[in-house]
Amino acid sequence: MSSAASTHPGLTAVSTMLTPIERLRVDAAGEGLYRALHRDSLEDVIRDLKERGAAAVVMSVSRCSREESSSRVASMVREFPRIPAVAILTELEPQTPQTVLSLGRSGVQTLIDVRQPAGWRELRNVLMADRATDIQRLALAQLTTDLAGVPSDCWRFFDTLFRCSPQVSTVRLLARRLDVLPSTLMSRFFRAQLPAPKRYLAMARLTRAASLFENPGLSVANVANHLDYSSPQSFGRHVRTVLRITAVEFRQRYDGEGMLHRFREELVLPFLPVLRTLTPLSGPPGWLPNPGPGTPSFATPRTD
């Protein structure tokens, strides 16, 4: 793995198959924006997609013309349709036109000529124009419409559900991102008679999982690892607990849009009147009346 990958572990991972000179230039172009995982074969690139959550693939036209058959590239693109594959051109060789045509037939839709400085800027723009995944963009676009007019910190809760990293897997961690005590967050949803934040977080994570499963090359183990479950069995138990189906049935039944639809139908649309007045992070003084003598108080929900 390149030094760029190990030095900046928090950046978006991009798997590459490049010549030695191209590796140096791709590292320089992506400094501070992404980390390049430089590989020597397409099999290694596919392993990055499965096991390391690489968000894009950058291939050298020169390397593809010399070493990789179009059928292997086509297989990768077919198995990971949601992950962009970009080809870069750094030099013209006798076989370059045929290789470019072959890459196009294999499903590689983006070719960037980096022989001029503008090409490297274009590469940066293509890889980093929007770091959110397709399902994150779709979810936030839809929720922006659904939740028009809600208080700002109510929107921040939903925005964080889909923007936070996969490592945010519990209400405690979510509350830390939102700068609120877990007990406060739970209590405000409970008192508003809304589903628990734990339910919202679980369904948002499964929406991500369903989107990942749209890539046939990803196994249940791969998806569990991407979303920071402790094991495939843990992921399976989570699916069964939340949806009452197996992980295999979940994969067969839902894609990302399907799970997003269920998220909205179960957790957003039925509760719009309440959500339009909900302030779960900074409830103003007097947002709930103090219970009088003899008035039963609400129990504090668990925060796990």
Image (tube, rainbow, N blue to C red):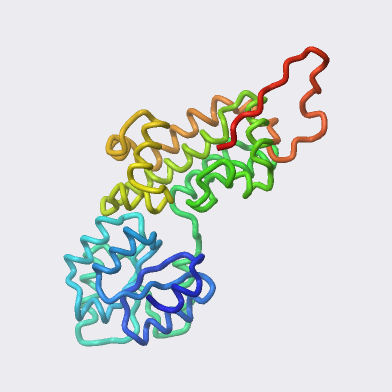
Instruction: Give residue 92's quadrant in the image.
Output: bottom left
The N terminus: image quadrant: bottom left
Q: In this rendering, would 74 be left or right of 169?
A: left
Outermost residue, top direction? Answer: 294
**For residue 185, above or below residue 88:** above
Above-or-below relation of 23 to 258: below
Residue at (44% x, 79% y) in the render: 3
**Quadrant in which the C terminus appears:** top right
Q: Residue at x 56, y 28 (%)?
A: 195
- Of residues 32 and 231, the one drawn nearer to the viewer in this rendering: 231
Residue 141 percent location from the top left of the image = 53, 45
Name the spot of residue 268 as percent of width and height, x first. Answer: 55, 31
Please tell me which residue is depicted at 52% across the width and 70% down the height of the picture: 33
- The image position of residue 250, as x and y in percent, is 32, 36
Left or right: 152, with 70 as reference point: right
The number of discs equals: 0
Q: Residue at x 25, y 69 (%)?
A: 42
Residue 84 showing in the rendered view: yes
Q: In the rendered image, is residue 150 in sight? A: no
Q: Is residue 247 left or right of residue 121?
A: left
